[in-house]
Amino acid sequence: MGGVEAVKHAIRVRIIAPFEQPELYAAYGSKAGGGILLYGPPGCGKTHIARATAGEISATFLSVGLNDVLDMWFGNSEKRLHAIFEQARRARPCVLFFDEVDALGGARRNAPAGAGRTVVNQFLAELDGVAGDNEGVLILAATNTPWHVDDAFRRPGRFDRVLFVPPPDEPGRAEILRIHMESKPASDIDYKRLAKRTQEFSGADLRAVVDLAAQAELDKAIRTGQPEPITEDGLAAAVKGSRPTTREWFATAKNYVVHANHAGAYDEVAAYLGLK
């Protein structure tokens, strides 16, 4: 995956190495496993990073969605959540991935008393290993809205490692464009030059650019009966007609960086925005 080298390095040091060299980490009283929260704009590859991490350590990968946990009957959501953690413990080494974790672990101060609070409490208990040992289980979670996640999830032993996943950098954008163009007919394309025009674009935005350019050529081919390769000009036109979806996220994130970053939770975003 292009453009997230700093994140990949942090994951290698903090996650992959403990699984590959457990005896070294054991000498310092550290164990393989734990919880990491990935956050950032949508479409920047948080789910892909989680899958790739599981592949690096040859671990079982369990992806958990809201439908896998939430149930209309009181108490069933907590039972489902416990069963998921038990499945991960039996399959270790295992990467247990929760997408949109803010929907399961939303701040309790914003929720009325009832089922929502009990699910959060159960989630915290599972992270703490109250019902079973979590060694060998890596719990990864992703969210676009970290400010909505309950603060208790960031305490040591839970999601104590929080990583910002930014939009891809310029070399990463060039690589992503090249990858998405591999299966399509294309003339000579300078991906580096195109990457300069796509600042702030997420990986999903870049895929949409390629799809837009391909659709334009397909429309021409339907009219002429003659398929033509996608050109750099065609991709540039698609870029010009697109808008990076990350801008809205950063506009919201900036408010939290400026007004609610007293504990330094969003220092990485502040640095990315040039505010620190």
Image: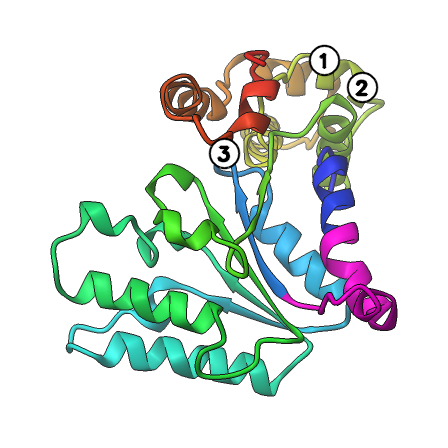
Neighbor class of circle 3 (other Cα within 10 Å; few <14, some 14-19, many 20+) is: some
Question: Looking at the figure, which quarter contains the C terminus?
Answer: top right
**Residue 270 horizontal side relative to residue 124, left or right:** right
- Contact between marks 3 and 2 (CB within 8 A): the answer is no
Relative to 115, residue 46 above or below:
above
Q: In front of the other: label 3 or label 1? A: 3
Instruction: Say the numbered circle drawn on residue 196.
Output: 1
Can you say which quadrant of the picture contains the N terminus?
Answer: top right
Disc 2 element:
helix
Looking at this view, is 121 or 78 the one in front? 121
Q: Is residue 15 magenta?
A: yes
> Could you tell me residue 37's position as x and y percent?
53, 50
- Span colored in magenta: 12-33
| Amino acid type, label 1 | Lys
| Separation of residues labelled 3 and 1 (CA atoms) | 30 Å
| Residue 265 - label | 3
Disc 3 residue type (three-letter): Ala
Contact check, label 2 and label 1, Cβ < 8 Å: yes
N-term mark: 3 or 2: 2
Say which label, 3 or 1, has the lower sequence index: 1
